[in-house]
Amino acid sequence: MTENRKEFKNAEVEKIVRDAMLNTQQQDKNEIIELIKIEGYPIFNSVIEFLTDFGGLHVYFKNQQNGIVNDDINFDLNHAFNLEVPERVFKDYIPRVKKELCIIGTAYRDHFILLMSNDGNVYGGYDDYLCKISNTGIGAIEAIILNQSFIEIEL
């Protein structure tokens, strides 16, 4: 277990994630790097470290805002890469945050793409909507599950 898994601040979220980890096969670091290279995204240590711990994880939770019982966060890179075209990330999202970004997963039943910058900040995007979710991957998991406010990034 790496330090990333010890940073949860909310015990309920930690339990949800820990339970989901029981059914998750950890991804190999080299496999993660190769997947990212193939898609043409930059390779960041922050992304590799986060996905080494959480890659492949699929967490289900009850959405506190709309009551959907099977809302989710999915850190399956292949799945995320199949849902979002790199052009949107490179031509729309990156210029708005003024940082390079790499896809790390999806949330809200594939309606939201999750991206991480080199400094570990996590962003979420859906069509023209883009927001900053958290300063860390674990913070993003907690923010999504606990229905915390995100910071919208204007067009």
Image: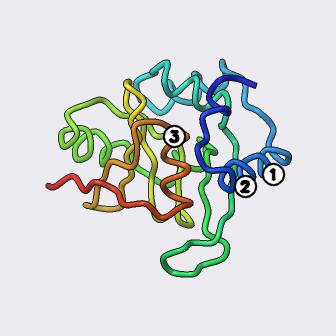
Residue name at image x 76 percent, y 25 percent: 1
What residue does disc 2 label?
16
Residue extending furthest right?
22
Q: Is residue 91 above or below residue 151?
A: above
* Amino acid under disc 1: Asp
Q: Position of residue 56 (x, y in %)?
A: 69, 42
Mark 3 neighbour density, 10 Å: few (under 14) some (14–19) many (20 or more): many
Name the element at disc 2.
helix
Task: Give how far apart the Cα atoms at labels 3 and 2 are.
Answer: 19 Å
What residue does disc 1 label?
19
Name the element at disc 1.
helix
Q: Nearer the viewer, residue 92 or 147?
A: 147
Task: Give how far apart the Cα atoms at labels 2 and 1 are.
Answer: 5 Å
Q: Nearer the viewer, residue 23 or 82?
A: 23
Task: Answer with left or right where residue 27 lies relative to residue 95.
Answer: right
* Amino acid under disc 2: Ile
Mark 1 neighbour density, 10 Å: few (under 14) some (14–19) many (20 or more): few
What residue does disc 3 label?
104
Q: Is residue 28 above or below residue 125?
A: above
Would you identify the image quadrant in which residue 4 lies? top right
- Evaluate if marks 2 and 1 touch, with contact meaning CB atoms under 8 Å apart: yes
Residue extending furthest left?
155
Mark number displayed over residue 94: none
- Evaluate if marks 3 and 1 touch, with contact meaning CB atoms under 8 Å apart: no
Q: Position of residue 43 (x, y in %)?
A: 46, 21
Of the residues tagged 3 and 2, which is closer to the observer? 2
The colour scheme used here is: rainbow
